[in-house]
Image (cartoon, rainbow, N blue to C red):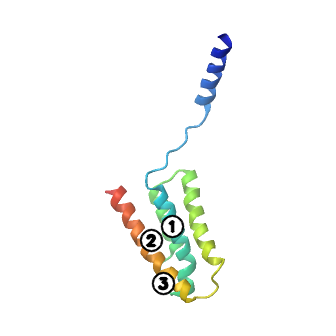
């Protein structure tokens, strides 16, 4: 019995010494997808269209406005980079497939941004 109390005390001390884990906001999954899309657009738009959007700067602004903790910031930046590299691996020139991807990604980005704003910002 004494040994059980000792183990219980050690367990309580160990758990109380552990850092609290941050809880993701309910829109984290959508934010990561939007970040991935923005990374893809950052690669595709200069390849296929002379757009004026600076997707990297917009991503930086989005992260600044969201004020994520370091873990979430890293995940958002990682999603952006994943989106960029996913298209950079397969596209070297603007092909019909790249144009179609650009069009679809722009539509999905708009839809996702609107959904995040509508569901979580109002």
| Residue 78 spot, x, y in % from top left | 60, 62
Residue 14 position (above or below residue 45): above
* Mark 2 vs 3: CB contact within 8 A: no
Distance between the Cα atoms at labels 1 and 2? 12 Å
In which quadrant of the rendered image does the C terminus lie? bottom left
- The answer to which of marks 2 and 3 sits earlier in the sequence is 3
* Viewer-closest of 83 and 62: 83
- Pointer 2: what residue? 109
Count of all numbered marks drawn on residues in the image: 3
Residue 108, by quadrant, is bottom left
* Viewer-closest of 62 and 106: 106
Q: Residue at x 42, y 76 (%)?
A: 107
- The answer to which of marks 3 and 1 sits earlier in the sequence is 3
- Pointer 3: what residue? 51
Disc 1 packing (10 Å; few <14; some 14–19; many ≥20):
many
Regarding mark 2 in the picture, which secondary structure is present there?
Answer: helix
| Residue 101 spot, x, y in % from top left | 52, 80
- The answer to which of marks 1 and 2 sits earlier in the sequence is 1
Q: Nearer the viewer, mark 1 or mark 2?
A: 2
Distance between the Cα atoms at labels 2 and 3? 15 Å
| Residue 71 spot, x, y in % from top left | 58, 51
**Which of the numbered marks, if any, corresponds to residue 59?**
1
Residue 80 position (above or below residue 94): above
Disc 2 packing (10 Å; few <14; some 14–19; many ≥20):
some
| Residue 54 spot, x, y in % from top left | 50, 76
Regarding mark 3 in the picture, which secondary structure is present there?
Answer: loop
């Amino acid at each position: 019995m004494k040994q059980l109390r000792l183990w219980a005390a050690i367990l309580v001390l160990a758990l109380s010494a552990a850092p609290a884990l941050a809880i993701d906001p309910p829109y984290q999954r959508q934010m990561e997808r939007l970040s991935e899309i923005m990374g893809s657009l950052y690669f595709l738009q200069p390849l296929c269209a002379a757009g004026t959007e600076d997707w990297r700067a917009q991503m930086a602004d989005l992260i600044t406005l969201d004020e994520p903790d370091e873990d979430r910031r890293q995940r958002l930046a990682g999603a952006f980079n994943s989106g960029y590299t996913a298209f950079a691996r397969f596209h070297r020139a603007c092909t019909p497939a790249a144009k179609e991807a650009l069009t679809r990604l722009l539509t999905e980005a708009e839809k996702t941004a609107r959904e995040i704003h509508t569901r979580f910002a109002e």
